[in-house]
Structures are given as structure tokens and as C-alpha cells.
Image: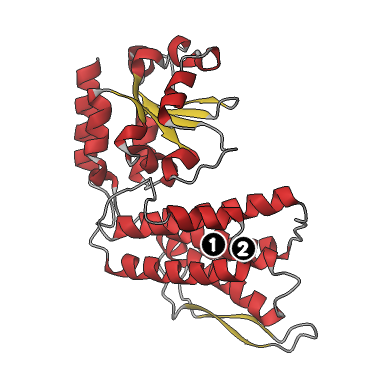
Amino acid sequence: MNIQMIKEKLHTDAYDFLRTDPHLGKNILILTAAGSVAYGTQVETSDIDIRGVAAETRQDLLGLSHFEQFEDRTTDTVIYGLKKFIALCLNCNPNVLEILGTKPEHLLLITAEGKLLRDHIDLFLSRKAVQSFGNYATAQLRRLQNALARDNYPQAEKEEHILNSILGQMDHLKRVYKNFTDQEISLYIAPSDKEDFTAEIFIDIHLQHYPLRDFKNIYGDMNNIVKDYAKLNHRNSKKDELHLRKHAMHLIRLLVTGAEILEGKGVNTYRENERGLFLDIRKGKYSYPEIFAMVDEYEQRFKIAAKHTALPGEPDYRRVEELMIGIYERLI
């Protein structure tokens, strides 16, 4: 479905909420096509996804009312309140950053204030993208890889998948809990004495004066990954097969988009260069081993981008706050 057809759809009764909901209407700053249309990966059966941003009303800001997000599941429309939207952008949340990075021709509505947000997207970009894009996508891809290969891969190789998922979370754990180094908590694979194992994951811990609760939470996060891999997954239907390939495609897209952000190339929601490849993955042209060989390459590119990025560790909160205040002053 092209953009003109989507614009025509917005004038139907199904989208009346855009005009009648008290938090939307004239308060909408940005409305854009999202999902497969925005990525360039749509097929004939693709749904219409709409995403947007709306300024809170005077009552929301100064009175007892409250508005964070509007959602209409029937039309797959999500519109964020401006404050929540900015908070998510500051954490490099992929779902909201892609609203600011869609192609201009995919915009269905934009005000001067909405343009200010899109023009200042660089203010939101930081090394937080390492976790929100790369570590998340890698963990999900490794989990998917293990689930698909559960009956075919040797036990030792499954251990490698689990270890890669845990290591992918390590940067996040180091930020959330009291700092530790790879020398203080080290995970690795070695031969196992267990009857059904040829190799397994081992851990060396050398911590002193470390908060017990932080260590409990670190262990809990790692244990949850192990438990997730232990759950059996039965995916035999053609529908599940299509869903898994689409899921893998979108996770690889996150890796590519995140790498570009870390390389200083901004947020490019539409994947012009990878569009053909992604559609081939979705349509089943590649086997799962071929897909995960690609994953290894994209993951390596992401790691290099993360290591050498010039992005700051944190966004410039003061400048973002000034931008937000300026937008509200124009609206109220």
C-alpha cells in the first residue's frame, strides 16, 4: 500500500479517533507511516502501522489530567505524549527514534513543532544505543538461533549461544549495578563432567566488598537467560515459520540501524540498501544457517561501531530540556 492510499485511509471512519479524541486532533505534532512501510519491507499482506507524537493539553500539563500515550489496536496506531516521547528518545528507544527518522514522504502530518523534533534528533543520540539496539537485537537473535537449532546443534554449540546472550547483556549489567570488570566476573566454556554435557558454561568470581543485592540481581538476570533457553519451543506451522523469518529480519534491521547511529550517520528508518536482502529473508530465500552467518557479520560491524563511536555516553539533557520548553512555549 502506497502513502497516498494510507492518507486516504486516514479519512475513513476507522480513524475518526484522530479527529475526535481530546488528546489528539490539533494536538498532533507528527503522524507518520511506520512498520514495514517505513522500513521498506512491506509485502501485499502487510498491515498499516501509524505512529505519532502529540503535545499534552493545557489541562494535562497544569491540571489534574494526564496523557502519556494513545493506542488503537484495531488500526495499529500509537501516538505518544510529548513528554513520554522525549523520555523514550533520551534512552535511544528504537520504536520512537524511528518516528524521527522516517522518510519525509512517509510523513502524514507534521507541524512546525514536530519539525523541530525531527531537526534536532542528534540531541537524543548517545552510546545508550549500544544496549537498546545492539545488545537487545543480539540477545533475541541468539535466543532464536538456539530455539531453531535445539534438535540439530551439538550440546556444546548450544552452550555457545547461551554464553553469547549473557555476554551481550554484560554492558547493561555493568551500568545498572555496581561496576565490575571482566576479570572480577568471567564467563567461559570448558569441558564438562556432566553425563549429558561435553562442555558447559563456567564462571569465575573474584569480588570483594560487593553489594549482595546487586550480585543477586546480576545472577538473576544471567539465570533468566539460561532458563529461557531451557524452555521448549514447538514451531511447526507455516504461520510460525513466516513469523520467525519476519522476526529475524527485524532484529537484523535493528543491528544495521543501530550500527549506523553509532557510526554518526543518524537515524535512517527506511532501509534502502538492505531492502532487497530483508525481503529475501522474509520470503524464505535464505536458510537459517545462512541468516545467522549474516548475523555474525552484522554483529561484528555493530561491535566495531560501538567501540569507536564518537557519540557521548549520555545525551545533552540540558539542551533537550530547552528544546522541550521551547516547544511548549510555542503551543501554550
Q: Position of residue 18 (x, y in %)?
A: 45, 16
Residue 290 falls in image quadrant: bottom right
Which quarter of the figure is the C terminus placed in?
top left
Up/down of 168 relative to 194, above or below: above
Q: Residue at x 51, y 14 (%)?
A: 12
**Total label count?**
2
Instruction: Estimate how packed mark 1 is, as few (under 14), some (14 to 19) or many (20 or more) residues with alpha carbons within 10 Å.
Output: many
Q: Position of residue 122 (x, y in %)?
A: 24, 46
Q: Decide if residue 149 is in sight here.
A: yes
Q: Residue at x 22, y 31 (%)?
A: 116
Q: Position of residue 63 (x, y in %)?
A: 37, 13
Up/down of 256 relative to 93, above or below: below
Q: Which mark is residue 139?
A: 1
Q: Residue at x 42, y 40 (%)?
A: 38
User: Could you say which is closer to the camera, residue 230 or residue 41?
Assistant: 41
Q: Tell me the SS state at disc 1.
A: helix
Name which residue type carries label 1.
Answer: Ala
Q: Position of residue 50 (x, y in %)?
A: 46, 30
Q: Which residue is mark 2?
A: 143
- Tell me whether circle 1 and circle 2 mark residues in contact (CB < 8 Å): yes
Q: Residue at x 44, y 77 (%)?
A: 182
